[in-house]
Image (spheres, rainbow, N blue to C red):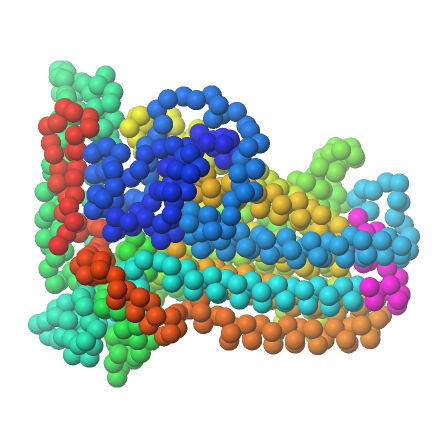
Amino acid sequence: MIWYGLCHYRPFSRLTFNAYGNHNRAGEKREATDNKRGSEGSEQTSLFGSEPAVSSTGSQLLALCQVRGKSRRRSHFNLERLIPSPGWVKKAWQLTEDELLSLSGLDAVVFMRIIGFSLRVFAFAGVIGIFILLPVNTSGDQLTSVDFADLTNNSLDVFTISNINSGSYKLWFHFSAVYAVTAFVCYLLYYEYNYISSKRIAFFYASKPQPEQFTILVRSIPVAQGGSVSESVDNFFREYHPSSYLSHVVVRRTRKLRNLINDAKKLYKRLIHLQSYPNENDQRSCCFGLFRRRVDLVDQYEKKLEDLEENLRMEQSEVSLATDEVRAAFVSFNSRYAAATAFHMQQSINPIQWITEEAPEPHDVYWPFFSSSFMKKWLSKLVVIVACILLTILFLIPVVVVQGLTNLNQLEVWFPFLKSILTITFVSQVITGYLPSLILQLFLKIVPPIMEFLSSIQGYISHSAIEKSACNKVLWFTIWNIFFATVFSGSVLYQVSIFLDPKNIPSKLAVSVPAQASFFIAYVVTSGWTSTSSELFRVIPFIGSLVMRPCVKRNPDDELEVPSIPYHRDIPRILFFGVLGITYFFLAPLILPFLLIYLCLAYIIYRNQFLNVYAPKYETGGKFWPIVHNSTIFSLVLMHAIAVGIFTLKKLSLASTLIFPLPILTLLFNEYCRKRFLPIFIAYSAETLILKDREDRNDHSMPEFFERLETAYQDPALLPIQYSPHTDDLNAPLISSSTAV
């Protein structure tokens, strides 16, 4: 199955459904598109059973676990699926933006726009850098010790701005390039922000009524003595929102229930496995080491399932009591405008009571958030801050090791016994060129999962908010620990001292950044090129499946979970390469061809992955784009600071003076975009909401939608679960669930 990213075939169905039995908003046209492209696989059952089920067993497990985007494994072997074919390139290239929108949602469109934006920026910068700045750099003679016939070690410096003589008029080419690229990037930023904003509004207009559009989350609900949270919510909103209030669902603590359901899931899988392989059913047990008797494991697990059912019923009845209520509730209204009004207005005289938040999609809710107390959440935020600081400090250890590998003299000091080996040209080139960035890349692999875990305990109520927070953390962690820690290689105190003296930052950047050009070129190759290749071949999941296969027993009826793209891993990588490209395009333009190759590979490979591999788990409506905008603005300002330092060191004071308006104009442009476009990504306007509400007045399915809305935010752990013991038929449901009323 590892080759499905490369071969042209559809390994499993990518149909996903929301809690209403309809296609996910990101895939309302997915069925038609899949049929058009000849996809293979089975459709899935929804919670309400409106679609054909794969089998009764699979559908019951799906309802139990509330898992979206699963399908059955193909049972027959097809050699053609394992033979690489270039046909996937053509199909990925022909994928239109509208098809991508219907397949994977607006977040996937924004992701591909990030790659396209970077391609246009570096194509423009590449023309200037390769055809103008690079010849200018090589025409200098500042570095007279460079041997053009032997391009090794520090020979790349001849292609950098360091080779230009101090005070040379040739530096005005670099000055003009900085202004030209800044203007072009700002123009593209404005165009993309405007385009994605309009796309977000159009996506909203085209969407069917969704629960989160009519619902808000209310926290810190005051409760009268002897009353309940449900009574308080109902009385409050009937009093102050009488014409628009529809219903509410009180959140309850269900940690124990989720643990019991997980145990039931494991037992269910084990039971199905035993029914698939009867030879493993019988087991002999020993009594006092003397006698052995045959034990029917199927009967054992069926009894355990019955016990779990009883425990679940008892726990659900206890959770249903007011004592397990969390002072939070999902409150639904009869219009989008009413929900937005309640969200934006302060509900109480006391601002720390009746706090309102936007409700996420029902399947996007992070239920463990509600099981934590206020003090635990507050302490968790402090723990996250401390953990991020400690992780940053600890990560300096591999950075220092990597920097030592780039310096042969330092290596000989650390490891004297390697002196004879390091004299071999090939070994020294591998150790100083490729190995450092490879080691750094291996350490970076653990950062996204750690940041996702830290974000999950930080107090976010949805999986999408957790991933967005993790995306920000990974991005700035990478910028600090890879860029600044590499450039200013030294102790933590030394790095901090540099930023405590802002006046000297440009000059120190001007000295340190060009010196690391060769390292970052190698980093683009090892991190960028290899990451896209491994993304295509799915190497990491393949290795993981090989490692886990001896430990986990599977049967032909097991289900495969369709993966979703980890935005918190891939977006920071692309944006960090954007930082490198923008800061180095006028210093060492030789990095641009390597970046362009990476972006071209990423553009075609990720289109294929969205088409054949990934399925969305949730939809943020393009909310990742503001992160892209802020990162690009930071890159421009950083480039300006380096340019000021470079021109000062090169004794071209007029150029350094004329650069000063650029960061100011860039920040003013950023402020304008923040005022003009950012509110669209925070909330929809009254005009948009009212127009959409008026459109729904003619929709005859709205009464049915409002009926389902009343239980849309029911905690999955509270859904009744029933076991069917003593069944000999593999396809008979052992676990079934029904929708709570």
Residue found at the far bottom of this picture = 349
323 over 3 or under it: above or below = below
Q: Nearer the viewer, residue 406 or 42?
A: 42
Left or right: 503 as drawn, with respect to 531: right
Q: Residue at x 68, y 40 (%)?
A: 434
Can you give x and y, in whole percent of width and height, for residue 680 in the image? 44, 69
Q: Which residues are magenta?
A: 156-173
Q: Quadrant of residue 697?
A: bottom left
Looking at the figure, which quarter contains the N terminus? top left
Q: Quadrant of residue 602?
A: top right
- Any magenta on residue 602? no
Can you give x and y, in whole percent of width and height, for residue 40 in the image? 38, 32
- Any magenta on residue 162? yes
The answer, for residue 461, to whether it is visible in the render is yes
Left or right: 571 as drawn, with respect to 33: right
Left or right: 83 as drawn, with respect to 245: right
User: Could you tell me how many numbered marks the image carries?
Assistant: 0
Can you give x and y, in whole percent of width and height, for residue 217 in the image? 27, 66
The answer, for residue 638, to whether it is visible in the render is no
Can you give x and y, in whole percent of width and height, for residue 130 in the image? 78, 52
Q: Quadrant of residue 60?
A: top left
Q: Residue at x 81, y 42 (%)?
A: 152
Q: Residue at x 69, y 53 (%)?
A: 123
Q: Nearer the viewer, residue 100 or 671?
A: 100
126 over 428 or under it: above or below = below
Left or right: 605 as drawn, with respect to 120: left
Q: Residue at x 10, y 71 (%)?
A: 227
